[in-house]
């Protein structure tokens, strides 16, 4: 087999693998820019099924969180993965069996706003990753004060860190989408101003 034919064969196999991974992810884009298509169709899931989140999907989601940008590349976050139903129920009351909560933690005692912002960027990366895998995701900020006040030891939050954000991940019904369940967004003209 000549080199040109070998290269074409490898390229065909790679393209087929990419197509299969998109098909198996539960999300297929009709747009050439699938990242923007995914974001424009995203929503915060409220209803989850009890189908377990696979370890492989969870690993991809966490790796996407690690890849988030951060001020001065400090990467201040630590992620705590919670799968124990009783512990998740203490964090989020209406949790569904086999959901996962990823607690995003950042250093304590830093007045620098960028730590919380950076943890937010990591959370958003993981949210988009979960949705790209056909999973539902919802970001929680309300339980954080209670988590820091009463659950530090239970959740094994590292010394010198505090919970900043919680991300719930789980499977959703196949027929649920942003068109039917997403909260309405403000209009483009209402929030965008071009400086003249």
Image: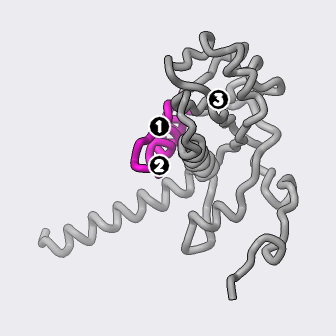
Q: What element carries label 3?
A: strand
Real-space Cα distance between discs 3 and 2? Answer: 25 Å
Residue 178 in the figure: left or right of residue 121: right
List the single residue furthest toward the bottom: 196
x, y percent for residue 43 = 75, 53
The label number, if any, that marks residue 70 in the structure image: 2
Q: Answer above or below: position of 99 versus 123.
A: above
Residue 18 lies in the magenta stretch: no
Residue depicted at x 40% and y 49%? 72
Real-space Cα distance between discs 2 and 1? Answer: 8 Å
User: Which quarter of the figure is the C terminus placed in?
Assistant: bottom right
Q: What stretch is highlighted in magenta?
A: 54-79
Residue 75 lies in the magenta stretch: yes
Residue where numbered disc 3 is placed: 100
Q: Answer above or below: position of 21 versus 60.
A: below
x, y percent for residue 148 = 67, 21
x, y percent for residue 147 = 70, 21
Real-space Cα distance between discs 3 and 1? Answer: 22 Å
Residue 192 in the figure: left or right of residue 108: right
User: Which quarter of the figure is the N terminus placed in?
Assistant: bottom left
Residue 190 in the figure: left or right of residue 65: right
Residue depicted at x 47% and y 49%? 70
Marks 2 and 1 in Cβ contact (< 8 Å)? yes
Give residue 106's quadrant in the image.
top right
């Amino acid at each position: 087999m000549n080199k040109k034919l070998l290269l074409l064969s490898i390229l065909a196999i790679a393209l087929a693998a990419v197509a299969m991974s998109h098909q198996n992810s539960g999300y297929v884009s009709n747009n050439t820019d699938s990242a923007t298509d995914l974001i424009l169709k995203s929503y915060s899931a409220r209803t989850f099924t009890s189908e377990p989140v696979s370890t492989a999907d969870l690993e991809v989601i966490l790796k996407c969180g690690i890849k988030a940008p951060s001020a001065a590349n400090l990467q201040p976050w630590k992620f705590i993965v919670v799968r124990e139903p009783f512990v998740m129920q203490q964090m989020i009351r209406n949790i569904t069996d086999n959901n996962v909560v990823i607690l995003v933690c950042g250093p304590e005692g830093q007045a620098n706003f960028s730590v919380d912002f950076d943890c937010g960027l990591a959370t958003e990366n993981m949210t988009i990753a979960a949705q790209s895998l056909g999973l539902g995701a919802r970001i929680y900020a309300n339980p954080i004060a209670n988590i820091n006040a009463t659950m530090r030891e239970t959740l094994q939050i590292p010394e010198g860190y505090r919970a900043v954000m919680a991300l719930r991940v789980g499977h959703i019904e196949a027929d649920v989408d942003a068109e039917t369940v997403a909260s309405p967004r403000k209009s483009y003209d209402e929030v965008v101003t071009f400086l003249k």
